[in-house]
Image (cartoon, rainbow, N blue to C red):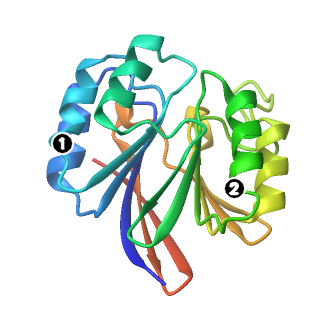
Amino acid sequence: MARLKILHVSDVHCSEAMLRRALRELAYDVVVVSGDLECPSLVDILGEAGGDVVVVTGNMDSGWVREELASRGYLLDGRTRSIGGLVFAGIGGIEPYGDAEKLRVEVDEKLLDVLVSHHPPYGVLDESAWGGHGGLLVIRRLVEGLQPLLHLFGHIHEARGQARLGATLAVNPGPLVQGYYAVIEVSDGKVEARLGKL
């Protein structure tokens, strides 16, 4: 089984300074961004990363951002990618239902290690400040069916934390625009997450 250190950030919301700081100050093998870059300039900054980069779009990201991510080979929406012996798959925030359906077909016979989505699964780290649930049932059902080791997402800024959904460790790092991040270590089938603030 692979040994990998993942830097997980989400909800960057055009904060070039925070993204640069995270890439410069934190140790990682792969950078995972779970949506809401918003500004295309951040795609260029991701090119400064010292490891692999995978990104799903967020609900605030434009088609332009998605095209820039795709042109760099970072986009994971509705796709899978193998990094360091782990299989990553993504559900973006622009077309989450379509991406989930693509993965349901593509990942059916593959072992999935890391699911990256913008939205959380319904009922897991998805409660907003006003008490409503912002998670998607389609994502919850996919996680319950595939049981990846790890599910990385953001979207609900105030629901920062980690939780379990069956065998899957779910992690919302909180918004990078406010300095929040998570570092996750995967080794020999075990996963350990640490939440931090810059």
Q: Nearer the viewer, mark 1 or mark 2?
A: 2
Indicate whether 59 appears above or below 90. Answer: above
- The kind of residue on which mark 1 rests is Arg
**Mark with earlier residue (1, 2):** 1
Residue 62 image offset from top left, x and y in percent:
47, 12
Percent position of residue 142, x then y:
79, 50
Q: Which quadrant of the view contains residue 113?
A: bottom right
41 in relation to 116, above or below: above
The residue shown at (53%, 56%) is 88
- In the rendered image, residue 70, in percent from the top left (x then y), is placed at 39, 29
**Which residue is rendered at x = 33% and y = 22% of the image?**
68
Name the side, left or right, on which 72 lies relative to 151: left
The disc label shown at residue 107, or none: 2
Secondary structure state at the residue bearing disc 1: helix
Residue depicted at 75% across the width and 29% down the height? 97
Drawn side of residue 14 relative to residue 50, left or right: right
Instruction: Assign a secondary structure to mark 2.
Output: loop
37 left or right of 147 in image: left
Q: Is residue 30 above or below residue 58?
A: below
Q: Nearer the viewer, residue 126 or 37?
A: 37
Left or right of 122, for residue 49: left
Q: Which residue is mark 1?
A: 21
Given residues 177 and 98, the one toward you in this image is: 98
Assess disc 2: are there few (<14), some (14-19) or many (≥20) residues with their C-alpha within 10 Å of its C-alpha.
some
